[in-house]
Image: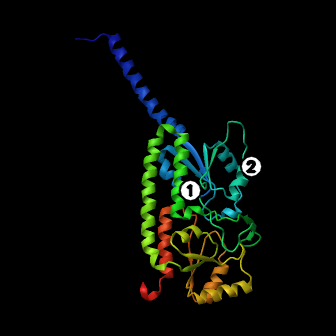
Amino acid sequence: MIKPINSMISKAQLCLTALLFCCWLSAAGPATAAAAELRVITGIAPLSFLVAEIGGERVRVGTLIPPGQDPHTFEPRPGQVTELARADIFFALNMPFERTLLARTPQQQGSGPQIIDVSRNIDKLPMPEHHHDHDHRHGEGAAHRHGELDPHIWLGPEELLIISRHILNGLSAADPDHAAHYQAAHERLRQRIKELHARNQARLAPLAGQTFFVYHPAFGYFAAAYDLQQKPVEIAGKSPTPRQLIALIEAARREGVRVVFTQPQFDRRSADAVARAIDGRVVMLDPLAADVLRNLEQMASVIQEALTPSGDQ
C-alpha cells in the first residue's frame, strides 16, 4: 500500500525537528551548566585546592599568585583586578596583598564578589623573631611589610579544618540548591585531614621538642601541631648580617642541625651559607604547593628524616 505523501512529509518534518532539538540541547547544555558554575577566586594555590575539593564541578576556581611567586612582593595585574571584580566569591586569608588588591577592585552597589575571610576564628600565632610590623627584604631591592601575626594558617591541620568549614559555608550560602553536594565533599575532605594529622602525629611524636632551621618562618602552625620549633635564618624578616649569620651557625652546631630548609619563593644564599658551615645541606619545602594535604605529609616525612639521628633511621 502506498502511504500518502503528506503523511510521509509530516513524519519527516517531525524527525527533523526532534533531531534539531536534540542538537540544541547538546550544544546548550554545557553552556548552561558552565553559566551556573560559581566563579571563585583565591589568593594562593593551597586555598584553591580546598575550594576545588569541596566545590567539585560546581565551581570554577582562579588563583591570583602563580607558582614560585612570593605573596609578600606580589603585584596584581590589571586583568586580575577585573577577574576578581567579576567573581562570585573571594575566599581571603586577610593577607596584605589581598587588602591591596581589594582596594583596587571597583566596588559598586550590588556588584563585586562576596568576600569571605577564612582566617576567622583561628587563633593566630606571632611571627617568631619579630612581633611588630617591619620591612622584609628578600633579594635585591625587594621590600614588603609583614603583620605581627603569622598568616600561614593553611599549614596547620587544625586550622585546615576551620578553613574548610568556612569554604563549605560560603559555597552553600551562594548555591543553596547544591548544599548537600558541598556538605558531602566537605565531610570527605575533613576525614582526610584528620587521618593525615593522625599519621603525622605518629611519625613526629618521637621528635617532640626538637628545632628545625628554616629560612622564612612559614611553618609555625605545622610546628605547633607536632610540638616542634622552627628557627628562622632570616632575622626580623631580612637576610642576616655577618655577625647574625655566625650566631646562627653556632646555634646550628650546638643543636646538631644538619639540614636547613628553605622555600622556592625566597633567596637561599643565607641558608646555603649556614649549610656549608655546618657541613649540612639545604632542603626545599614549598608552603604554597597546591595539594596541601600531600604537602603536609611530605613535610612531615622530610622533617622526620632531617631530625632523626642517622643511626636511628
Q: Are marks 2 and 1 in contact (CB under 8 Å)?
A: no
**123 and 107: which one is in front?**
123
**265 and 297: which one is in front?**
297
Furthest residue in direction left, as rendered: 1
Q: CA distance from mark 2 to mark 1?
A: 22 Å
Q: Which of the 4 image quadrants contains residue 270?
A: bottom right
In terms of sequence position, does the residue under pointer 2 or pointer 1 come before the other? 1
Residue 221 in percent (x, y) is at: 57, 67
Q: Amino acid at mark 2?
A: Arg
213 vs 145, left or right, is: left
Query: Which residue is label 1 attached to?
Result: 47
For mark 2, give the secondary structure: helix
10 vs 242, left or right, is: left
Residue at image coords 48%, 72%: 300
**Residue 219 visible, this orientation:** no
Residue 119 in percent (x, y) is at: 61, 56
140 vs 119, left or right, is: right
Residue at image coords 43%, 89%: 311
User: Which numbered dot is residue 140?
Assistant: none
**234 and 163: which one is in front?**
163
Residue at image coords 22%, 11%: 1
Query: Label 1: how many residues lie within 10 Å, few (<14), some (14-19) or many (20+)?
Result: many
Residue 97 in percent (x, y) is at: 70, 57
Query: Label 2: how many residues lie within 10 Å, few (<14), some (14-19) or many (20+)?
Result: some
**308 and 72: which one is in front?**
308
**Residue 277 visible, this orientation:** yes
The C terminus sits in image quarter: bottom left
Query: Which residue is label 2 attached to?
Result: 104
Residue 282 in percent (x, y) is at: 58, 80
Residue 52 against residue 302 in the figure, above or below:
above
Residue at image coords 65%, 68%: 126
Q: Amino acid at mark 1?
A: Leu
